[in-house]
Amino acid sequence: MCGIIGVACGRGAFSKPLGSIIKEALKQLEYRGYDSVGYAVIGESLILRKAAGKLDDVAGKLNFEGVDGFVGMGHTRWATHGSPNDINAHPHSDCTGRIVVAHNGIVQNYLELKEWLIKKGHIFRSETDTEVIPHLIEELKSRGMTTLDALRRTVKTLRGTFAILVLDLDEPNKIFFARYVSPLIIGVGEGVNFIASDIPAFLKHTNRVLVLKDGELGYVSQKTVYVEHVERGVVDVSRRIRIIDWTPSMAMKGGYPHFMLKEIHEQPMALRTTINGFDESLDKAAEMIMEANNVFIAACGTSYHAALVGEYALAKLAGRLAHPFIASEYTKYLNAIDENDLLIAVSQSGETIDTLMAVRKFKGRGARVIAVSNVVDSAIPRDSDLPIYTKAGPEIGVAATKTFTTQVAVLLELSYRLGLKTGRLTKSEYLDLHRELTMVPKVVSSVIRRYEGHCKELGRRLKPITSMYYLSRGVGVPVAMEGALKLKEISYIHAEAYPAGESKHGPIALIERGFPTMFLAFRDEYMEAILGNVMEMKARGAYTIGLVPEDSSKLIEKLDYPLKMPYLTPYAASIVYVVPLQLIAYYASVERGLDPDKPRNLAKTVTVE
Ligand code: M6R
């Protein structure tokens, strides 16, 4: 987590001070953490300023606009070691104040390093793990090393994960960097180079990107990009520079009050682009599934819910059992894995550490890996045998929305193609399902148009509540789980999802007059059973809301607040039904006076275990 940006521009590259450029970049990275902000700039001297709080709140105090220079770095923090206060904010400096470091990741062996450095006379100011890095570089330089040599040695000494930027007054034109696991991307511009945790930070200035790999380090200056591998020496990166087709406006709010609302509304486009982009990689993936002995699906949070939809469709439509699991729990299967097995890793960012570790450990056992990700060249697809990309465009809101629906679209099409290959689906059944999927973007548009007002009203009604259930059956269960996660993470209302049949085995004990319960009923074999569950909840006083097929008159009659959904198979419905749930969560958050884009304690990409 944490967002870092470095800019090497020389004098006069921009019409405004470098501090402003760094501030704008940090704004695009704030989704990665917003506990504190800081920057360091080298001009006449080295200026370092930092403070606890969100960028907008502390920008004036830090005087971004008033600071110019020829190289600089910025950091927005998601606290791990040390509370979110001014002192623990990044960048951190060595004893002399001539070397400063911004870091994303965790230095696992920082305590032993700190102890060693203190014995050598170094003075520490913060409680962070990061602070060992500038002191280590200082220590190594005092033994005659150059900054680059000292950084290389430091990288070899650190255990953990890191994306590091270093400024050193002894080499004032360069930003040194190193990457291991935590993302770091160079933006190659004209007479200015950038280096950041994510592309939107510099997209306004350049769309030529170089994604750094694990173990790479080096420096950027105004006109140079130098990269080497910590063990293998100089790396020729000229052929690794790619042009990104995201536009800067894709990473801005475009008139919406929040990124989340914009991204909910972008779903028809994101789905259309993803579905139009389906290619032979899905056939390859289907073949890999057919060849595999066991199939596993690893993911976290929202991506895990997409994985559960995938599991359902693979079983129902292709007769293929897959084992979905929450990526951080990967160790439970490891002893059972060998080279005949397959892991499908689902991660919008492609950088989630738990999913990445699952990928690496499964690969270590010889398993093959398919990745489903939204970020080209990110760590998880890079480590996989077959990357498949959703084409949702940049997602900035911490709550995943368009990346979920596009992940589901990919996993459904994969299941459809596998069903066709295994003979579980006839050609015409496949074509019907595929055709329906291509219609989903339009259906999503019309559902947003028709129901946004109702979702706003529901958001208002939910404002005072403290707890809510989401119940469904079949493929609706992961959609219910996603609805509950959305409400919980951005409105802080406790929300749980259960298979509706399971509600009688405990959860129903909480039901009393007015307890809100959301039912999701799809056009499938569970409709009758869901009606029964609605009646049980109503009998105990629950306030029942439901997304139900438009012709399910019995259900519509019984629910307190029904929203009628279009005629769809449960598969396409798993994409469409989640959209009103996203909107309800969004409006509940706004009604409560919260910022849905920046929920407390969360960060968009979780790069610490
Ligand atoms: O980037 P990933 O898809 O791997 O992220 C996984 C989760 O961290 C993510 O889905 C998280 O649960 C979101 N906050 C959900 O809105």
Image (cartoon, grey):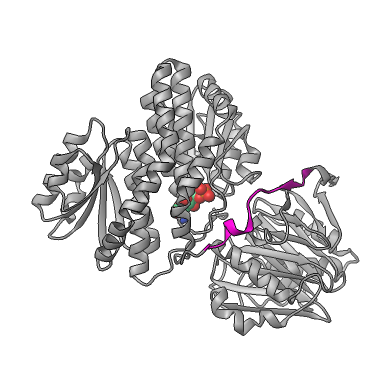
User: 80 or 238: nearer the eye?
Assistant: 238
Using the image, determine if residue 369 lies above or below residue 283. Answer: below
Q: Quadrant of residue 163?
A: bottom right
User: 172 or 116: nearer the eye?
Assistant: 172
Number of numbered tags placed on the structure image: 0
Q: Quadrant of the N terminus?
A: bottom right
Q: Position of residue 35 (x, y in %)?
A: 54, 71
Residue 498 is a magenta residue: no
Is 336 left, or right, of 577 in this rendering? right
User: 240 or 279: nearer the eye?
Assistant: 279
Q: Residue at x 17, y 36 (%)?
A: 529
Using the image, determine if residue 348 lies above or below residue 340. Answer: below
Residue 318 can be seen in this image:
no
Residue 288 can be seen in this image:
yes
Using the image, determine if residue 28 lies above or below residue 574. Answer: below
Q: Position of residue 92 (x, y in %)?
A: 69, 73
Q: Residue at x 26, y 42 (%)?
A: 472
Residue that lies at the very extreme toward the left in this rendered image? 539
Residue 248 is a magenta residue: yes
Is 126 left, or right, of 410 in this rendering? right
Using the image, determine if residue 128 lies above or below residue 397. Answer: below
Q: Position of residue 457 (x, y in %)?
A: 27, 62
Q: Position of residue 399 (x, y in %)?
A: 45, 56
| Magenta stretch in the rendered image | 240-254
Residue that lies at the very extreme toward the right in this rendered image? 144
